[in-house]
Image (cartoon, helix red, strand yellow):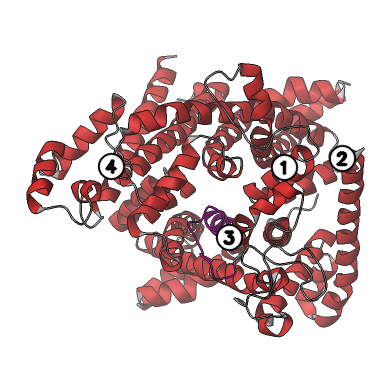
Amino acid sequence: MSELWMMIGKRLLYGLLTLFIVSVIIFGASEMLPGDQAQALLGQSATPETLAALREQLGLNDPAPVRYWNWLAGAMSGDFGISTSNQRPIADLISGRLYNTMFLALYAATLAVPLSLVLGLLAALWRNSIFDRVANASALTSISFPEFFVAYILIVWLAQGGHFTSLARIRENTTFVQRLDMTFLPALTLTLVVTAHMMRMTRAAIINLMASPYIEMARLKGLSPLRVVLRHALPNALAPIITVVALNLAYLITGVVAVEVVFTYPGLGQLMVNSVADRDMPVVQAISLIFASAYVLLNLLADVLSTLSNPRLRHRR
Amino acid sequence: MTFLWILVGLACLGLSAVVLGWLFRFPLVALTRGELRRAMRGAPLMASFGMLVILIYAAVALLAPVLAPYAEREVIGAQYLPWGEGHLLGTDNLGRDMLTRLIYGARNTVGIALATTALAFSIGALLGLWAAAVGGWVDTVLSRIVDALMAIPALIFSLLLLTIFGTSIINMILVIAAIDSTRVFRLSRSVAQGIVVMDYIEAARLRGETMWRLITREILPNAMAPLVAEFGLRFCFVFLMISSLSFLGLGIKPPTADWGSMVRENATLISYGDITPLLPAGAIALLTVAVNFVVDWQLHRASGLKD
């Protein structure tokens, strides 16, 4: 048992190291910019004196490692610095939007994960049937669609039919149910985009297992196909399925950007796109750090969970 | 009721794709010889439909000035004209002909995506093969750098880099090629690692072949099959990424005709129930689907699966 914890501890350390490197890359990126934050805040017309004063105040004269440390320590405690395009604290810009984005991603995940697992199981069960072929072809098709295409098709079909709203106007007093209704179309778009991949991987993982001798044995014992899949194949297919679910949740994080723009949903992705257009470096850095950390953590989670679900990895000497 | 109609429509689309694929297989078989001909005869209908679509796109891209009724940036009338005589698919937000811009978009969008993929491949594949052939600390350092860069999601990383370098076509091509080359590096390195342990590589080394010759003449030809399939997949990825960036207003910019930014510019039409802005998006989707079908077939063939 202690070996298992050693292994998980090692994975966690490795994940932390990855997070550290990612933060260094994101911070280091701004070092390549000509000019600095003081210049960006005050504009071209600033006098040398005011520039020097602001640099002193923001601590821009410190060497890069010290500034990196201050930036990271600030980010950990929720202080990301000041936006260069509107001089507001970034934490204020981000907080509400972070919640909105998390809400949308979780909403999409709760729709997509059960749907794709069931579809994948059925496709594996009825392998090479019409259902399997159609599911496979449509999965391949929907992987190839850009997110905004799916989003606009849903708008034309569902929003214009008057079923759902295409604009997510979220206010302070929006109730949870209203919110679910308003964000249904963006969540559905994301669901359609990630379901295909998850379904294909689930199907492949199970079909791979179905060829192994112990499944043959179970079948020869006269078990029903459903029981063979659920009781015998599924537990062993858990590791690849967990991995692909986590990878797709990580994909949701980037997929969210275009979808938020289409539906003018007030989330982090939309803020990031606007900030890139304004070249507002501190905001882009802060959001990149949040997205990248979520991505790394989800991958780490997948790693740990698939280790835990595999007895062979658990009891390795 | 609408749902039923959509299902019927989708079924018709799927069916016509199958029929077109079936029809297109005859000229494919007739025009090829030998090994290739046998492969074509066994091609799934979706794959041959994919090849037909790719061929049509290539023809449209090459013949754009001949096919298009107007010049790429010519204003021909009022803005947002409906479909009709003289402007088959209507006009866009500045009164330019929609059909013309769609045709030129094939040239610009696909051309830029191809150039980016080719760049990503020449960087990634060469470095990957080199790392595998040299081994030692070069391999370790390069692999660790690539691991670190791959820990950041591609779209987020490209947005970060575009903030630093500013948004322009050249910057976008370089940024996406750099990010994508890390993925190519991974694959080509792992493919080459299986090759460098072969005896003929040992023999080539003993003969005193230079590193360049070793990579290009001994390793590369044997790593070609998986790399070609990867090229198709990477192209889809790059193409979707460029379209997304253009759609977000951070990629290819007007007045250059491009499918992603065409959707963005004319998106307001959608709220009036006009589906014209979906056409460029559909053009993107169709090409990606087609390439995916062909790549899927090739991967299936290369892996020797016969299920």
Task: Name the residue at 27% across, 49% down.
Answer: A30
| 3D distance between C-alphas at marks 1 and 3 | 19 Å
Query: Could you give the CA–CA distance between mark 1 and mark 4, rounded to whole angstroms?
Result: 40 Å
Using the numbered discs, state the Cα–Cα distance from disc 4 to disc 2 in whole angstroms: 48 Å
Instruction: Indicate which label's residue lies in the foreground, 4 or 2.
Output: 4
CB within 8 Å, label 1 to label 3? no
Q: Which residue is tagged 2?
A: A131
Relative image position of residue B261 (x, y in whole percent): 58, 60
Comparing marks 1 and 2, which lies closer to the viewer? 1
* Residue B131 falls in image quadrant: bottom left
Write down the residue under mark 4.
A24
Q: In the rendering, which numbered label is found on residue B153?
A: none
Q: Which of B176 and B144 is in front in this view?
A: B176
Q: Nearer the viewer, mark 3 or mark 4?
A: 3
In the rendered structure, find residue B261 and report the number of the disc placed on it.
3
Q: Mark 1 lies on which chain?
A: A
Magenta span: B237-257
Distance between the alpha carbons at the discs numbered 3 and 2: 37 Å
Q: Name which of mark 4 and mark 2 comes first in the sequence.
A: 4
